[in-house]
């Protein structure tokens, strides 16, 4: 079975990290497949929501595959190619027009946490543990990864997490703003599905434009202020607003296409 799989049903796509015997340790091949899956989501499937999840409750992802990393360190060109795929996959995930949810349980460190922070929402069970450890390896977190982390948990907490490489538990992650929701393990599926359904009921145009507007304000895209303003102006001319306004006046639930 593939280490990365993509399924789709009822407006919800699911990207599964499926290497449980290795705690979903991420190889270059897996990063490439994640990037390809994001292209398929954006260009072909076009769901309202993408859920990124793990086949194992023990780990969302333990980060880089250590055995492969040892090989990469001996080949600088191949290492650079691997690093490029890591960035490409996370950027594609971040820029998806649909809403994205990371369903987290168990270990979530390094590149695994990078995937989680590239999603719009992060829902976890109490068993999760989080860390980013470049300082323990003599490495530096990338600009885009660091920006996402700062935008989520703030400058001070990002510095603490990155400089110490410390591991934090799920309760701390919630307090820091790293998590959107924290629920007991047996309620995790239900909570993720609840959020996904609420997003499916919202306007996909609104969600896409909200993401772009927030990214602009956070310095995470290169849109001009005029382009962002146009998203606001054009909404009043759109089919979603027509349906939303009619539903409001008729006191019914809007049915967005």
Image (tube, helix red, strand yellow):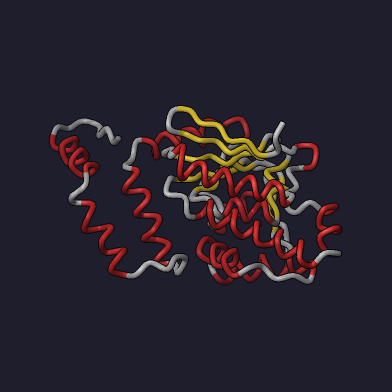
Residue at the image point whose x is 63% and y is 49% from the top: 170
Residue 168 shows in the view:
no
In the displayed structure image, the side of residue 4 where residue 226 appears, left or right: left
The one nearer the camera, 103 or 173, is 103
Residue at the image point whose x is 13% and y is 37% from the top: 249
Viewport quadrant of the N terminus: top right
Task: Reply above or below: 60 against 210.
Answer: above
As drawn, the residue found furthest toward the front would be 77
Task: Reply above or below: 27 against 132.
Answer: above
Residue at the image point whose x is 66% and y is 39% from the top: 4
Residue at the image point whose x is 66% and y is 69% from the top: 160
Image x and y of residue 67, in percent: 85, 52
Quadrant housing residue 243: top left
Could you tell me how many numbered marks the image carries?
0
In the displayed structure image, the side of residue 56 where residue 43 appears, left or right: left
Residue 76 shows in the view:
yes
Image x and y of residue 37, in percent: 57, 43
Image x and y of residue 118, in percent: 55, 54
């Amino acid at each position: 079975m593939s280490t990365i799989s993509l399924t789709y049903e009822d407006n919800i796509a699911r990207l599964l990290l499926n290497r449980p015997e290795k705690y979903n340790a991420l190889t270059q091949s897996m990063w490439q497949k994640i990037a390809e899956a994001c292209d398929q989501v954006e260009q072909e499937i076009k769901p309202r929501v993408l859920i990124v999840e793990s086949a194992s409750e023990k780990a969302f992802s333990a980060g880089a595959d250590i055995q492969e990393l040892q090989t990469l360190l001996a080949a600088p060109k191949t290492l650079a190619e691997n690093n490029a795929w890591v960035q490409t996959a996370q950027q594609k995930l971040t820029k998806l027009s649909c809403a994205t949810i990371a369903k987290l349980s168990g270990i979530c460190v390094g590149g695994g946490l990078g995937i989680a922070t590239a999603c719009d929402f992060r829902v976890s069970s109490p068993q999760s543990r989080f860390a980013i450890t470049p300082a323990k390896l003599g490495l530096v977190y990338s600009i885009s990864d660091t920006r996402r982390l700062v935008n989520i948990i703030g400058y001070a907490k990002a510095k603490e997490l990155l400089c110490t490489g410390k591991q934090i538990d799920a309760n701390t992650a919630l307090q820091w703003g790293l998590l959107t929701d924290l629920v007991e393990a047996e309620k995790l599926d239900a909570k993720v599905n609840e959020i996904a359904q609420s997003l499916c009921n919202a306007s996909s145009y609104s969600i896409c434009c909200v993401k772009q507007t927030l990214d602009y304000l956070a310095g995470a895209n290169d849109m001009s202020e005029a382009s962002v303003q146009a998203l606001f102006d054009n909404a009043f001319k759109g089919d979603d607003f027509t349906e939303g306004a009619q539903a409001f006046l008729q006191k019914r639930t809007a049915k967005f296409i």
